[in-house]
Each structure stands twice: as structure tokens, then as C-alpha cells.
Amino acid sequence: MEYRPLGPTGWQVSALGFGASSLGGVFRDVDEAAAIRTVHVALDGGINLIDVSPFYGLTRAETVLGKALATVPRERYYLATKVGRYGHDEFDFSAERVVQSVDQSLQRLGVEVIDLIQCHDIEFGSLDQVVSETLPALEHLRAAGKVRAIGITGLPLAIFPAVLDRQRVDTVLSYCHGCLNDTALLDLLPDLTARGVGVLNASPLAMGLLSHRGAPGWHPAPAVVVAQCAAAAAWCAARGADLPRLAVQYSLSLPGIASTFVGTASPQHIADNLAWATTPPDPELVAGVLQILQPVHNLTWPSGRPENN
Ligand code: NAD
């Protein structure tokens, strides 16, 4: 496993990170014992950064992750969770709620400190409130020793400079913009790097678009993106190649990113991801898939408030 520095934190994080949303049954019904084994396979394979949120499975992912981590020495992993998003349409970035939320996460996760606390999907809230109320509340929690680093997450890339122009954060987490069908995150990297922010990239399989099972029913991508990704999967299969493998290797090969979070609750899938992470993507396969995806390249979808898109 390759380890890379994460912005100003001083941490060396694994290039492949574990995204724990799957533990909450976001993609399918999940067997808890298998989910716990998945976390252990991830850590044993060299992953040292885990991302979760109270939103995933409406607190279930944090609870299952807490059970998995109960038997793991604390120094073996950096733990990232979030505040502000609690349901599909439930957001609360108030200082009071985020302080309460961190205490609840600490309890569910069974730890004394959260390494990285992130404001979750801030485009659904008021960026003014995030800057003037949420982030200062998290700074108080840092001073109190409950969290060590502070970040923001969301889909529209414009939210990151909009906040960073007004307030310092340690990390940004972008998703579905650092993968085979969408590399828009790369355009923002020089700016983020110049600001010294750690860059986290989530969803190398574009939240299932680039998997064998295809996109889940709730996937927000336009139908044309879903169709082209399915065509890319079929093209790979016809050559005896594997689109998920290529997708993971491609995201890991992108420059300027500290860690890429892949999500799964399957011990076999995380073992596959770990094995794939050790080799670069086949350039010919990348070229073929990028050609199929060219008509939908960087085609995204609106998320949150119109003014934040
Ligand atoms: P992903 O791109 O990692 O795709 C997950 C899907 O890919 C699941 O259906 C999974 O079963 C499948 N998959 C994973 N490994 C596979 C393999 N080896 N073979 C075949 N299929 C495989 O998307 P994700 O889970 O949404 O993103 C990863 C993590 O990133 C999340 O768990 C979360 O922690 C983080 N994330 C954060 C935000 C945010 O903060 N707003 C948004 C998206 C993702």
C-alpha cells in the first residue's frame, strides 16, 4: 500500500481509503458479520483511513463500524466522520446540533477522538452558516480534544473555493469527480494544493455506475451516463477485463489526491480492491473505456441549493 501526506495534518494516509457507507446498507441489505469482516480485511491489507457519517444507514454504518473497531488498536487507523446531514432531506449545520452529533458519533464509534470531522454535503445548507457557525463550532471541539482535523464535503466543486476563500479547513472530500467518467476534480487541484488543503476523492466506481451490478435505483446520474457506463462495463467484459478493477486503478493513478475512498461491505470485494491497488491501470483498456465515456465525460447532476451549484 502506498501512503501519502494529507494536507496539513502530518498524517500519512493509505492511497486507498475505506468508505463505510456500505456498512449501513446503502447499496443492498448487508450481513453484519460480513460487514465487520470487511473492515478487518481493509485494515489488515494496509488501509489506515476510514470514512463514515451518521447519515449512512441512518446511524447504522457508524454503529456497525464501531463494533468492527472495538477489537482494533486505536493507533492502526485514522477515523473520519461527518456532521450536518442526518437523512436524505435532513440537514442541520447549527452549532448546537453539530456539537451534539460529534458526541453521538464518538459513542457509536467507541472512540475518544475523531481524527477528521467533516461538514457533510454543505451544498444543501447555507455556506454562510457553515463558515460563520459550523466550522467555528468544530474548532471549539478541536480545542476540547474531541476532533483533530476539520474538513468539508460535497458534490459541486464550486463549494470548495467558496468556503476556502473565507475559512481555513484541513481537507476537502469530493466525490464522483475523480473517476473514469468524470475527472473535473483535477481542474481544481492546483488551487487546492496552493491552499495546502488535503484532497480526498470518493467513489472510484461512481457510486456503483462503474460496478457489475450497475447503479442503484436512487443514483442521481442522468440516464445517458448510466447507459454509457453500462456500455463500458459490457465492452470490458467482452475483452475478459473488469471495469471495477480498471475504475479503482484509474482513480488511484490520478495525481494530487491523498486518498480515494472505495465502499463495500463484502470481504471479497475489499480484498479485490486491495489487490488491484498494487498495479497501475492497463493503458489500452483506459483508452478504450475513456472513448466510450467521452460523450458523457464530466456530465454531472445538480445537488443541493441552486446557488451552490
Ligand atoms: P463507490 O464508487 O466506492 O462504489 C460503491 C459500489 O461499488 C458498491 O455497490 C460496491 O458494492 C461496489 N464495489 C466496491 N468494490 C467493488 C469490487 N471490488 N468489485 C465490484 N463492485 C465493487 O461509491 P461509494 O461507496 O459511494 O463511495 C465510497 C465512499 O466514499 C463512501 O462509502 C463514503 O465513505 C465516501 N463518500 C462520501 C461522500 C460525501 O461525503 N458526500 C459521497 C460519496 C462517497
Image (cartoon, rainbow, N blue to C red):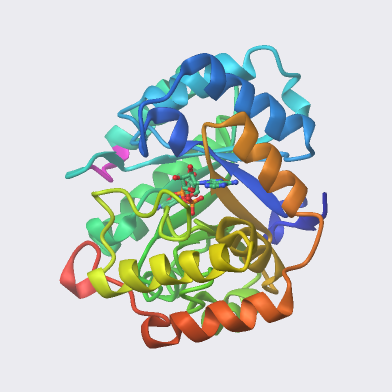
The answer to which of 82 and 238 lies nearer the viewer is 238
Res 14 visible: no
The percent position of residue 125, horizontal first and vertical second, equals 23, 56
The percent position of residue 31, horizontal first and vertical second, equals 46, 19
For image coordinates 63% across by 19% down, the residue present is 69
For image coordinates 47% across by 82% down, the residue present is 292
In the image, which residues are magenta? Answer: 91-95
For image coordinates 39% across by 65% down, the residue present is 230
For image coordinates 37% across by 82% down, the residue present is 296
Could you tell me which quadrant the C terminus lies in? bottom left
Asked where in the image residue 47 lies, by quadrant, the reply is top right
> Magenta stretch containing residue 93, yes or no?
yes
The percent position of residue 122, horizontal first and vertical second, equals 32, 57
> Magenta stretch containing residue 29, yes or no?
no
Side of 51 relative to 255 (left or right): left
Q: Is residue 18 above or below residue 219?
A: above
Q: Is residue 267 above or below residue 51?
A: above
Side of 72 relative to 143 (left or right): right
Res 212 visible: yes
The answer to which of 247 and 176 lies nearer the viewer is 247
Q: Is residue 69 above or below residue 137?
A: above
Side of 114 relative to 184 (left or right): right
Prevalent SS, magenta region: loop
The answer to which of 41 and 170 lies nearer the viewer is 41
The answer to which of 170 and 268 lies nearer the viewer is 268
The percent position of residue 213, horizontal first and vertical second, equals 41, 48
Q: Residue furthest front?
A: 238
